[in-house]
């Protein structure tokens, strides 16, 4: 891994500013790849003003970030460069502005009505609101292992395990690109005890944390961003400085290379359990359209790593095992294929609109696939008279588990 602290980059992220109060955390779990780096900023917790009534501790400072998605914030300028790509500081678990069971913004009255502690109620109602849209950490059990507006240690630990599966570059699992989780920062127990009193139906009873991580931008494929590659393609060409056809083609190549890696994550993370079963990563309640972000060079990075969980595939005999693995591989491809191809089409249309150089759609895609997969660890191509197939191997090199998938028909 080549890491460098950067000066302000040419690209500054855009978004709505948010000022967060900075506090000391109650403990930190560090990604093994970052253990040798001094990263004080990543060891703090970042909370909105609306959390103050729950805690009688003064902040040690403030930090201006940009709102990113529902419960995250990101820095405007990069803080680190890894292997030539700028990464921005991101914190996940800063609270939400919206009630979990409606589309209504949080109000003091709703939060107070859920509390039994009268002194906290009084502090909330008497506090002067500095935030236009106050956000709250809550104790409502949300999405199995996480409190609404915050993050749970269980989910953060899953994200850390996935991060540490990467190679020495810290951003790649055999070609599947990830936005690395740097540290898990635990919230003080006294604060947890108070904010988890705010719940509607089921109370979160595990440990609450924040994730401090690195992301290459705040731009997603379709959802949960002010700008997305699917809806704002033209604006993003300008934002990413794609001002000639060569740059556009390189952007497309990187998009295709990283997209194919997403479609084949299982075989890139596969292990033999030596008991007739194989394990590998699959996606749990996370999706390409909202849980991945785009680097300025077109590379897709998976950001919400809590949804990358290992599954085990077996069978009653070898033929059954091979069939089940192929079924899982095909299911994983189809899970994201449409979103990948739709976004690809928007980028290609914008390239043609700006720079011309129009060619046959399928010929162009085949050219990009061949270029993008030239050095791929597990995927090759096979061309016949009427189709182009992905030949999908695995990092174990077990040829009997190879699968072919038709990506183009003529």
Image (spheres, grey):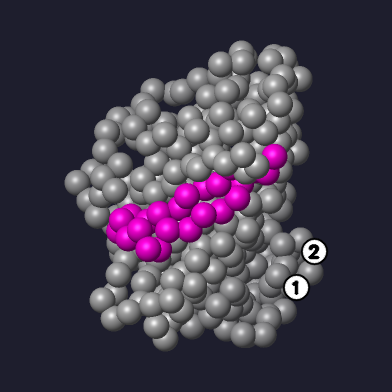
Q: Is residue 90 magenta?
A: no
Residue 241, percent across and down? 59, 19
Which residue, given by chain and number where applicable, does mark 2 sit on?
103
Residue that lies at the very extreme toward the left in this rendered image: 36
Q: Secondary structure at mark 2?
A: loop
Which residue, given by chain and number where applicable, does mark 1 sit on?
101
Q: Please provide the residue range marked out in magenta.
A: 388-410
In the picture, the quarter occupied by the N terminus is top left
Q: Is residue 190 above or below residue 343?
A: below
Picture disc at residue 110: none
Res. 217 visible in picture: no
Residue at 48% x, 58% y: name it: 403
Q: Is residue 249 above or below residue 199?
A: above
| Crowd band around label 2 with a 10 angstrom C-alpha radius: few (<14), some (14–19), many (20+) | few
| Crowd band around label 1 with a 10 angstrom C-alpha radius: few (<14), some (14–19), many (20+) | few
Which of 164/66 is in front? 164
Q: Secondary structure at mark 1?
A: loop
| Residue 162 position by quadrant | bottom left
Residue at 59% x, 73% y: name it: 143
**Whole-number angstrom distance, CA of label 2 to CA of label 1:** 7 Å
């Amino acid at each position: 891994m080549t890491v460098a602290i950067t000066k302000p980059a040419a690209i500054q992220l855009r978004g709505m500013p948010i000022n967060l109060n900075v506090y000391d955390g109650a403990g930190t779990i560090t990604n093994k790849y970052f253990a040798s780096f001094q990263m004080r900023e990543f060891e703090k917790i970042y909370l909105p003003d609306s959390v103050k009534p729950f805690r009688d501790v003064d902040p040690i400072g403030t930090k201006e970030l940009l709102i990113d998605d529902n419960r995250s914030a990101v820095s405007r300028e990069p803080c680190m460069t890894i292997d030539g790509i700028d990464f921005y500081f991101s914190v996940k678990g800063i609270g939400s502005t919206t009630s979990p069971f409606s589309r209504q913004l949080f109000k003091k009255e709703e939060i107070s009505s859920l509390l039994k502690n009268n002194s906290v109620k009084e502090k909330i109602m008497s506090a002067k609101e500095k935030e236009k849209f106050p956000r709250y950490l809550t104790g409502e059990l949300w999405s199995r292992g996480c409190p609404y507006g915050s993050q749970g240690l269980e989910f953060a630990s899953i994200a850390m395990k996935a991060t540490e599966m990467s190679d020495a570059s810290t951003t790649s699992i055999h070609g599947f690109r990830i936005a690395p989780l740097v540290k898990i920062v635990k919230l003080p127990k006294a604060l947890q005890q108070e904010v988890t009193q705010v719940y509607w139906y089921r109370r979160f009873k595990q440990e609450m944390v924040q994730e401090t991580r690195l992301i290459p931008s705040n731009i997603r494929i379709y959802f949960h961003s002010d700008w997305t590659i699917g809806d704002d393609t033209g604006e993003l060409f300008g934002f990413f400085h794609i001002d000639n056809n060569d740059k556009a083609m390189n952007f497309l190549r990187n998009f295709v290379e990283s997209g194919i890696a997403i479609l084949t994550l299982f075989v890139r993370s596969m292990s033999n359990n030596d008991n007739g079963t194989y394990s590998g990563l699959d996606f749990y309640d996370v999706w390409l359209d909202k849980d991945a972000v785009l680097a300025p060079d077109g590379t897709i990075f998976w950001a919400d790593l809590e949804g990358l969980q290992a599954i085990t595939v077996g069978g009653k005999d070898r033929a059954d095992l091979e069939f089940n693995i192929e079924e899982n591989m095909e299911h994983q491809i189809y899970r994201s294929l449409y979103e990948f191809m739709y976004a690809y089409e928007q980028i290609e249309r914008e390239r043609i609109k700006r720079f011309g150089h129009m060619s046959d759609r399928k010929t162009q895609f085949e050219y990009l696939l061949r270029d993008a997969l030239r050095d791929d660890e597990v995927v090759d191509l096979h061309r016949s008279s009427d189709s182009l197939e992905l030949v999908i191997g695995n990092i174990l090199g077990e040829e009997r588990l190879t699968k072919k998938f038709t990506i183009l028909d003529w």
